[in-house]
Amino acid sequence: MSINHPNFGQLADDRVIIFDTTLRDGEQSPGFSMNLAEKLRMAEALAELGVDVMEAGFPIASPGDFESVRAIAETIKGPVICGLARTGRADILRAAEAVAPAERKRIHIFLSTSPLHMKYKLRMEPDEVLQLAIDSVRLARQHTDDVEWSAEDGSRTEPDFLCRCVEAAIREGATTINIPDTVGYALPADMHRIFTMLRERVPGAEKVIFSTHNHNDLGLAVANTLAAVAAGARQIECTINGIGERAGNAALEEVVMAIRTRPDAVPCKPAIVTEHILRTSKLLSSITGFDVQPNKAIVGRNAFAHESGIHQDGVLKNAATYEIMTPESVGWSKSSLVMGKHSGRAAFRDKLRALGYGEVGDNQLNDAFRRFKDLADRKKVVYDEDIAALVEDEGRDHDRIRFVSLDVRAGSKAPPRAELELEVDGQVTQSDATGDGPVDAAFHAIQAIFPHEAKLLLYSVGAVTEGTDAQARVTVRLEENGKMVDGQGADTDTLVASVRAYVHALNKLLVKRARTEPAALSA
Ligand code: KIV
Ligand code: ZN
């Protein structure tokens, strides 16, 4: 029997809902926090990718979270926009307010049900927890007819109690029931057993969508997701590049392509535009500054690379010998070399659209184009990744501190020395400093121009593309009074990229400071 869902209507038995939680569970993981503009850009890309539900955040968590869920609800058309809430009245009302402007909206309530969580985290008896489930779903239903209820730590919950809670949530009007493997403990056979049990034993199960949400602590998130789908789950919770708490969540790209590649074994249809997968993955990497590992399935640099002669020979004769899906089906182009120093502004704008940046404002376009020309002079080939890195670097119109120039002396003969110029609130200031290495000297020069107390927690360097002329992408993490921010910078010169990343982080910190202490706008 097919389900009649308030937001999706009559659902065919083989339709599987893709619920993306990159902006909530994904953003929650260390180093992956995004600001409002970045979340909006990511949300647009997710809508173009065709996700059915977008969990935009946890509105009660902070004013920033509320604002971004609200902004996404106001601007993003297509997917159902979902806000997360605990069972408390304040949580649910805040989530309801944040998603209110959306054309299609959902409130997602979660509540721990495992013996361990009830005893130590909630300090509640099972009957009290059951009552909370009832009251919270009832309240949420007063604000939207699409309510998802999650049994946190569901995979370690005692089966009879899980059935009682799920039955109560359905009776109160929950339309999706999610059973998370919160700690990534389950094996595929466990997931299959849990969903089969719920569908067989719980009265009303036939009226709701069962959802699966798997963490990757044992590297089994995708396998567990597919096992749940085989047992009748029809919503998959996942994230781009598998980001999320600890070891992450099931990766959207892996789950979707497993289903698409093996219709014989998983007879389900996700409505994802798979050709957009790679660009969405790259957008996330460039926003967060964290690349996926080269051998990452589907989106890793080597996912479709054939190194051995035997494999290359086979692929040339017939690609299917060693490729189970085409690279183009997930967005890889045959060659990612596209732009050179003769490319004009219109081609550059077109390229940005193709990379998923939508309409870039004239100022940002001009600055990025100028840097692109400069890069094309210095670098033999300019790849999509280079352009993405440039645009990410330029999209910061409101920054108080801007990079102007850097001159560094390094080597084995004299202590490293950096001469730096930064523009602070419109005024160019110069400084020079020494340090234990050129990066340290450059960072001391920043400190001299803009004194601050923030601690440097992380400094990481990666190459945007291959080759010795590749741009370096640097991530810098700063911490001040418990507030943590990540900054990114890209340049063919690693030291310039380092200063850009540091300055980016500092600007983010200033925005955070201004939000909490509006008067303290100076260093
Ligand atoms: O992992 C988890 O249990 C969660 C819930 C909030 C659904 O993320
Ligand atoms: Zn989770």
Image: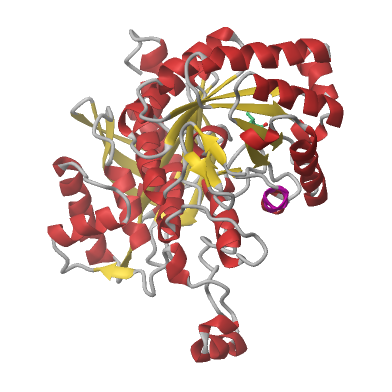
Residue pictured at 66% horizontal, 21% vertical = 171
Q: As rendered, which of 1 and 292 lies closer to the eye? A: 1
The quadrant holding residue 137 is: top right
Left or right of 388 on screen, residue 339? left
Q: Which residue appears at 60% of the width and 84% of the height?
A: 308
Residue 248 relative to residue 65: left or right: right
Of 325 and 209, nearer the camera is: 209
In reply to whether residue 226 is colored magenta, the answer given is: yes
Q: Quadrant of the C terminus?
A: top left
The N terminus - image quarter: top right
Q: Residue at x 35, y 11 (%)?
A: 520
Residue 262: x and y in percent read: 62, 66
Q: Is residue 304 above or below residue 491?
A: below
Q: Quadrant of ligand 1?
A: top right
User: Percent position (x, y) of residue 155?
Assistant: 78, 36
The residue positioned farthest toward the front in the image shown: 1
Name the dominant secondary structure of the magenta segment.
Answer: helix
Q: Quadrant of residue 395?
A: top left
Q: Is residue 296 visible?
A: no
Left or right of 426 on screen, residue 37: right
- Left of 66 or right of it: where is 247? right
Residue 302 visible in the picture: yes
Q: Is residue 366 above or below residue 63?
A: below
Residue at 58% over, 73% down: 324
260 vs 320: above or below: above
- Counting from the top left corner in percent of width and height, residue 455 is at 52, 28
Image spot of residue 309 (x, y percent): 58, 89
Magenta stretch: give its range: 225-231
Q: Is 327 a magenta residue?
A: no
Figure check: 351 above or below 486: below
Coloring scheme of the render?
secondary structure
